[in-house]
Each structure stands twice: as structure tokens, then as C-alpha cells.
Amino acid sequence: MIDTVLSSPIRTPHWDLPAGVKAFYTTRKGGASQPPYDSNNLAAHVGDNPADVQSNRGNLPLSESTAWLTQVHGKRCIRITEDYFLPLESAKADASFTTEKNMVCAVMTADCLPILVADTAGSCVAAIHAGWRGLANGIIENTIHSMGIPANQLMVWIGPHISQRHFQVSEDLKQVFSEYPEAFKKDAEPGKYLCSLAHIAGHICKSMQVNSVIESGICTYVHHSDFYSHRFAQHNGQTHTGRFVCGIYLQ
């Protein structure tokens, strides 16, 4: 089922989860941030007023137990325990997982793939930030290995991201993913292609024997008034934009 776009600041994915597993994603509506971050920006690293970001974060489920990451387009996945919330700085990582209750694994995006993972027993959850660099670096594979659960017992949800229609890339990037030719279509501009990150992610998951992969069906570029889109902002002369969040936790 494709998620529909509504103005609510916090939404629940159309995803049949095991008992005790909760997931959510935010829109850019209903927050305190001023333009160009208007209005529910959750990122502290994009130049927004820190007080506004903190106010927006305070509206999230289990906001005091959200494991924020410093995302670097790598492949590191960390385990979230109570000790994670002691350091003053967030870990440099692009994915996290936990087996403990009431701790939110979360990722921030504005075109990249936000990927949420749960096991069918409802005992472990994970959140992944996957742009093309993360996919190439193996962030999905490393996260699944880190969880330590057979992949055929995992279920995956891919949240709002830039769709193939609006993600133009070069020949060089196409060659990075040469094993996934179906993820690319020739663009009208010579030497350019349109890339489906979700197609690549789905194939990676299925190659690892993940049986259930669900997509939200929402394009951040098309629905830029509801979700932050870095590429849309660039195409319209904006140097800054916010980030929305996808999160998952055990209850």
C-alpha cells in the first residue's frame, strides 16, 4: 500500500509490524522553524535556529530516547543501549539498531533513502540512512549483519525519498552500480541517467534473503511542500533545507 501525503507532522507507515514494534516518520509541517527550514526541521547541522530544532524534536515519540546520529554516508552501524545517551556528541554512523525497549533508532533525510528494519519476532529494530554512497559502501549489508538475525526473518520499509524521475546522475555513478542496470533509465540529456535508489536497495535486501520489502511510494522532490528535498532546494536557488526523520522502536 502506498502512503498518502497528509499535513500531519508525524505519520505512521502503512506497514504490518509485529506486536510491540512502533514506527513513524515526520513531515515538514507543524514545527517552529522559520524559512527556509519551515517548519518542522529536525536537523541540528543545517544552520537552523538550535532552539527551534530542539522544540521540534521535543514533539517526537520518546523524544528523550531518540538516538541521533552524525550521518556521514558511510557503512557504520551502531548498537543503541542506555549508555548511548551519555555522550555529548552523536556517533558518526549511518545506521543503528537496538534490542532494548523505548529507545528510538532514527535517521534524518532529505532525498536519501530512510530504511526501517524489524524482525518478525519483534525483538530487534534498526534505522538506516542510505544515499548512493551509503548503498555503494554497504550500509544495508552491514546493518543486517550487525543485527545478528537471519535476513529471512527481517522486514524492511523504505520511506519517502527522491524518485527515479527526479534523480539525474552521471555515467560515472551508473558504473558504480553496474550490477543493477534495471535501476537506470536514459535521460533526455546526453550522458545522463535517471536512477532509482529504491530499486538498488530492494535488490540488495532480496539478495540477502530479506523476504519483505515495502516502499512508501512518496517522492520527496514531488512532495517538497510536505517533505524536505535537497535537490528541489538546489534547483530553486536555496542553499539550505531541513531534514525529516524516520524512526522505529520497541515498546
Image: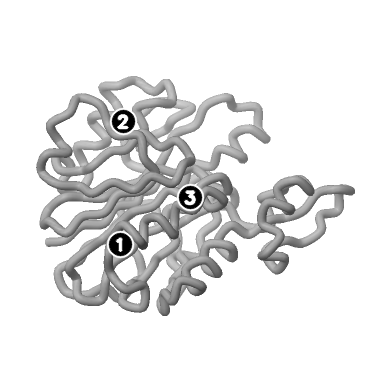
Label 3 secondary element: strand
Name the residue that disc number 3 marks: 130
> Where residue 176 sits: x, y (%)?
68, 51
Q: Which mark is residue 12?
A: 1
Q: Nearer the viewer, residue 20 or 166?
A: 20
**Image vertical order of residue 21 relative to residue 121, above or below:** above
Inspect this view and state whether residue 112 appears. Answer: no
> Mark 1–mark 2 contact, CB under 8 Å?
no
Q: Earlier in the sequence, mark 2 or mark 3?
A: 2
Q: CA distance from mark 1 to mark 3?
A: 20 Å
> Where residue 41 sits: x, y (%)?
37, 35
Q: Nearer the viewer, residue 64 or 79?
A: 79
Quarter of the image with the N terminus in it: bottom left
Residue at image point 43% right, 26% down:
46
Amino acid found under the numbered disc labelled 1 = Thr
> Where residue 141 sits: x, y (%)?
44, 59
Which one is in front in this view, the residue at disc 2 or the one at disc 3?
A: 3
Name the residue that disc number 2 marks: 32
Q: CA distance from mark 2 to mark 3?
A: 27 Å
Most extreme residue toward the right, as rendered? 190
For the residue carrying disc 2, how many other residues have a C-alpha within 10 Å: few (<14), some (14-19), or many (20+)? some
